[in-house]
Image: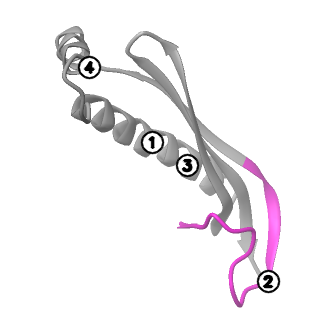
Amino acid sequence: MKLLNISYIPGAEIEALGMVRGTVVYSKNFGKDFMAGMKTLVGGEINSYTEMLNEARGIATKRMVDEAEAMGADAIVNVRYGSSSVMQGAAEVIAYGTAVKIK
């Protein structure tokens, strides 16, 4: 599945099939969340949260792709990501775009 964050596929004519999305609410375990909280005292990257968001983006992307494949899409254009905090230590990640068929 081709994923693009532009609204067209260079050199191809496309037909829009509809919007597709994938969402996930993801959390780290208490031990890692506690250690991440300690890291805020000294500053720097909180690797466990970076890892958490990368994993969540991967899951959301797969769910979006699965939805597009079910529609018979060849690609997804205008791919975007969003995230928000749902509660302490948990984040929602959404991936969305337009499923298209290449003519």
| Kind of residue indicated by mark 2 | Glu
**Chain-order first, disc 4 or disc 2:** 2
- Of the 4 image quadrants, the one containing the C terminus is bottom right
* Label 4 SS: loop
- 83 versus 18 height, above or below: above
Q: Are marks 3 and 2 in contact (CB under 8 Å)?
A: no
Is 6 inside the magenta-drawn segment?
yes
**Chain-order first, disc 4 or disc 1:** 4
* Label 3 SS: helix
Give percent across and percent down for residue 68.
64, 54
Residue picked out by circle 2: 13
Give percent across and percent down for residue 60.
50, 40
Q: Residues within 10 Å of mark 3 (few under 14, many from 20)?
A: some
What is the span of residues highlighted in magenta in the rendered image?
1-19
**Chain-order first, disc 2 or disc 1:** 2
Q: Are marks 2 and 1 in contact (CB under 8 Å)?
A: no
Residue closer to the observer: 60 or 86: 86
Badge nearest the viewer, 4 or 2: 4
Outermost residue toward the bottom in this view: 11
Residue closer to the observer: 28 or 40: 40
- Left or right: where 47 falls relative to 52: left
* Label 2 SS: loop
